[in-house]
Image (cartoon, grey):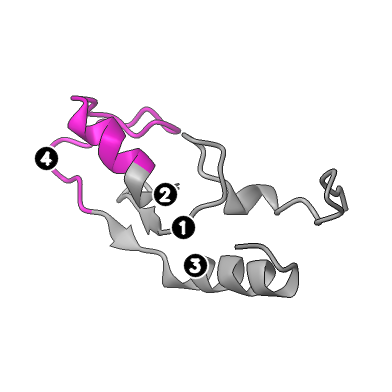
Amino acid sequence: METSSQGIPAPPEDFRCPISLEVMAEPVILWTGQTYDRQSIQRWLDSGHTTCPKTKQELHDDTRLIPNYALRSLIQSWAAANSVE
């Protein structure tokens, strides 16, 4: 497992938002099945994009953001175990 210069294990790639590349604070799922951090995907949608950033599928009018509670719990557990805020 990779570690940062502070000796903290690098987060699993699935914990990173595909848009911001940062660890997700509030992971949400689009109907395409892709997970993004709420702030990043909301900014993407608000800027007029009508496709899923990862799959390029047209979202049409279905831009519901469904909380990904399971991933959020995993991220929180990883952060607590590694003293990451």
Label 4 sits on what residue type? Asp
- Quote the CA–CA distance across marks 1 and 4: 25 Å
Are the two marked residues, 2 and 1, in contact with CB atoms closer than 8 angstroms? yes
- Asked if marks 3 and 1 touch (Cβ < 8 Å), the reply is no
Q: Is residue 80 left or right of residue 35?
A: right
Q: Residue 22 location in percent, x, y? A: 56, 43
Q: Main secondary structure of the magenta part?
A: loop
Q: Which residues are magenta?
A: 40-64
Q: Residues within 10 Å of mark 4 (few under 14, many from 20)?
A: few
On the rendered structure, is 25 left or right of 59?
right
Say which amino acid is labelled 1.
Ala
Q: Which mark is residue 61?
A: 4
Instruction: Determine the CA span between mark 4 and mark 3.
Output: 26 Å
Q: Are marks 3 and 2 in contact (CB under 8 Å)?
A: no
In the image, taking residue 79 as reference, residue 7 lies left or right, namely right
- Residue behind mark 2: 37
Q: Kindly identify the residue that appears in the image at 40 percent across and 51 percent down.
A: 33
Which circle marks residue 72 in the picture? Answer: 3
Gap in angstroms between the C-alphas marked 3 and 1: 7 Å
Q: Locate residue 20, reporting x and y percent.
A: 49, 35
Mark sitting earlier along the chain (2/4) = 2
- The type of residue carrying mark 2 is Asp
- Whichever of labels 3 and 1 marks the residue nearer the N terminus, that label is 1
Q: In which quadrant will I find the C terminus?
A: bottom right
N-terminal of the pair, mark 2 or mark 1, is 1
Label 4 secondary element? loop
Q: Which residue is mark 1?
A: 25
Residue at horizontal 67 percent and vertical 63 percent from the top: 84
- Residue nearest the viewer, comparing 60 with 78: 78
Image position of 31 (left or right of 27): left
